[in-house]
């Protein structure tokens, strides 16, 4: 059963800056062993239908990663409105 984490994270990426290689949040630091899947979310979340515009749309790149601690995590890069903030969304194993 997935365990919600919902914390901002520091993420190291490949030199191209597109693929996560390590992540840290709170006192947890792990290395990414494998990227299992990736997808994008351009949804509106809980925004009221009348308020849905391109500015209220999510711009997130999600990754499901397997890490050296033996766990799998869903992490995402929030790219909306000039933000470039990584988050650990949940532990999925």
Image (spheres, rainbow, N blue to C red):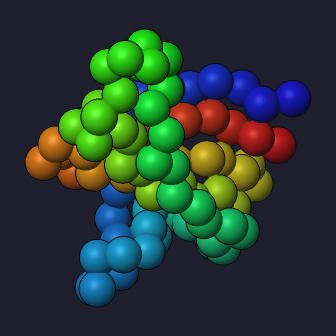
Task: State the image coordinates of residue 35 (x, y, percent, origin top left).
Answer: 63, 71
* Residue at 82% from the left image edge and 43% from the top image edge: 93
Q: In this view, does 46 lie above or below 70?
A: above
Which residue occupies the foreground of this view, 77 or 33? 77
Q: In which quarter of the image is the N terminus?
A: top right
* Residue 89 seen from this side: yes
* Residue at 76% from the left image edge and 41% from the top image edge: 92
Give left or right: position of 65 versus 10: right
User: Farthest residue in the bottom direction?
Assistant: 16
Which residue occupies the foreground of this view, 14 or 24? 14
Q: In this view, does 9 lie above or below 21?
A: above
Q: Is residue 63 above or below residue 86?
A: below
Location of residue 11 by image quarter:
bottom left
Task: State the image coordinates of residue 43 (x, y, percent, origin top left).
Answer: 49, 40
Which residue occupies the foreground of this view, 40 or 84? 40
* Residue at 28% from the left image edge and 42% from the top image edge: 54
Task: State the image coordinates of residue 52 (x, y, percent, origin top left).
Answer: 35, 28
* Residue at 64% from the left image edge and 24% from the top image edge: 4
* Residue 10 seen from this side: no
Q: In this view, does 68 lie above or below 49?
A: below
Location of residue 17 by image quarter:
bottom left
Q: How many marks?
A: 0
Give left or right: position of 49 versus 17: right
Give left or right: position of 91 versus 12: right
User: Farthest residue in the left direction?
Assistant: 82
User: Farthest residue in the right direction?
Assistant: 1
Task: State the image coordinates of residue 26 (x, y, percent, origin top left).
Answer: 39, 29
């Amino acid at each position: 059963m997935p365990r919600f984490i919902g914390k901002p994270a520091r993420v190291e990426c490949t030199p191209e800056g597109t693929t996560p290689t390590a992540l840290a949040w709170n006192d947890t630091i792990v290395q990414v062993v494998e990227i299992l899947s990736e997808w994008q979310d351009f949804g509106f979340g809980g925004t009221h239908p009348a308020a849905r515009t391109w500015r209220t749309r999510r711009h997130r790149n999600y990754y499901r990663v397997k890490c050296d601690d033996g766990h799998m995590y869903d992490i995402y890069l929030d790219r909306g409105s000039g933000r470039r903030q990584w988050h650990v969304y949940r532990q999925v194993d």
